[in-house]
Amino acid sequence: MSPTPARTRHHLLRALGAVTLLTACALGPGSPASAAPHSVTVDLAATSGPVTGVGSGFLYGLTEDGSGPGDDLLAPLEPTSGRGGGARLDGGGWAGDGYTAGPGYQRRITSALAQARRLTTAPHHGTYDLLVSDVWGADTTQAPDTVYPCAGGDCGNWESFLRRLARDVRASGLDVRLDVWNEPAGAFFPPGFNTEQYYGMWDTAVRVLREELPGMPLVGPSLWDYSAGNLGPFLDHAKAAGTVPGILNWHFSQDPVADAASARGLLAARGLDGVALGMNEYLHADEQHAGHQAWYLARLAASGIPSASHAIWDDCCAAGTLDGVLVRDGSGALRRTGQWWVYEAYAKLDGVYARTAADGPFDAVAAVDAGARSAGVLLGAPSGGAADTDLTLRGLARLGGVTVTVRRIPDTAPLDAPVTVSTTDVPAGTDSVTLPLRPESGQDAFSVSVTG
């Protein structure tokens, strides 16, 4: 969409000013300055599938050896996914070693496997997308004269790298997902996406990795954003070449629900069954606020995408701050933030999803565990959009007498605990209760717990 011309903007502003004046006159002196609160309704008696925890994952959220942060800060978030490949570690990976397995390569693969071990084994049992191109060295720190895989049609060195990587993954005994190349439409793969060289790189990777590591899912093309115009030709080529990934992956959807529906349409139109969806980077830097994060988690849960991981914009790539969800105080100790508390509230959702409906900026994800007589709701709005809202919980009668607690999660760093707004005892037989949510900042999120 092109920018609005200045003259058009001028007329629009004049028109808007006139509408504002007319509205003020219609209200008259003493009229209410604010509109009635918006509403969100959660029906605990109308449920769907089991809670998946999608979105509770981190790109380069751990320290280099995977040991940090400690379990006191990681375990409460119940991470379901992770992603990494040793980016920005000294040595430059395979390419930095002169296209061989030297110390730069070894440091990166060692780090990636250590992080994978932390996230994929007990107690977390999440997935880990091993970023193959970062181990190779394409992390924006590569030299200007870097020779990218399959230049001039020669894929020999790329194949040698893939077989060495596969050998090291196999020796680790870990199950990972192999993310072939990160964001190939930009600086990470200057030859370009959907080019002959890209397809040579991609097809070689799929062929070799399937041969060496059968059963391990392949992830791609991991585009910077969702683009049906780019994904369509990629899928056409991959179908013809027999190199369709097991997980069709992209980054930074504006709305995961809409993009997931579009992606399923692209796959269906080509008769490609059994391909999962993934988004192993989400949230732009200016969206990493408590309220926006809660809203996005609600949209991820509604999208049906099985896995998604929070993006990193600062402290790349071994700070162990869970992508800025933790911050360090003056003594160097890690402290929780509003974003951390959003993930903690999200992790507490258990059982099956409950139906939600909203007429304002807030969106909600809710779950109910009737056997445990408990339920939970997480609410947020896109950045800066939180507004006065009334939350109605229905279907409470199935849980018996309960206590409903509302907490406000400020977008603050550090934040030692959310703010308890209200605690309401709801007697047995009462099926519905309405609770006011009054944000003090446009970035606030809210969590609601129902306990029997």
Image (spheres, rainbow, N blue to C red):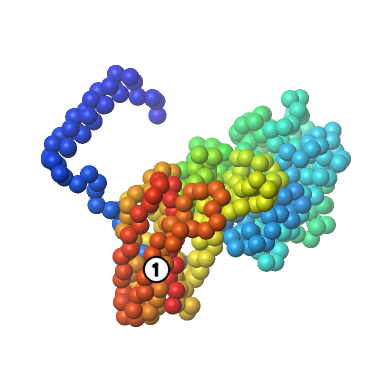
| Type of amino acid at the residue the image marks with label 1 | Thr
Residue at the image position 67 percent from the left and 41 percent from the top = 316
Answer with left or right where residue 141 lies relative to residue 194. Answer: right
Total numbered labels: 1
Residue at the image position 82 percent from the left and 40 percent from the top = 104
Image location (x, y in percent) of residue 376? 45, 66
Image: 69 above or below 160 = below
Query: Can residue 262 be seen in this snapshot?
Result: no
Which residue occupies the extreme right position in the image?
Answer: 102
Image: 338 above or below 93 = below
* Viewer-proximal residue among 446 and 416: 416
Q: Which quadrant, please, contains the N terminus?
A: top left
Image location (x, y in percent) of residue 212? 78, 53
Residue at the image position 73 percent from the left and 25 percent from the top = 144
Task: State the SS at label 1.
Answer: strand
Label 1, residues with CA under 10 Å away: few <14, some 14-19, many ≥20: some
Per the image, the residue denoted by label 1 is 423
Residue at the image position 69 percent from the left and 58 percent from the top = 70
Q: Which quadrant, please, contains the C terminus?
A: bottom left
* Viewer-proximal residue among 200 and 9: 9
Query: Can residue 320 be seen in this snapshot?
Result: yes
The answer to which image quadrant residue 69 occupies is bottom right
The answer to which image quadrant residue 53 occupies is bottom right
* Viewer-proximal residue among 244 and 431: 431
* Viewer-proximal residue among 438 and 363: 438
Image location (x, y in percent) of residue 197? 69, 32
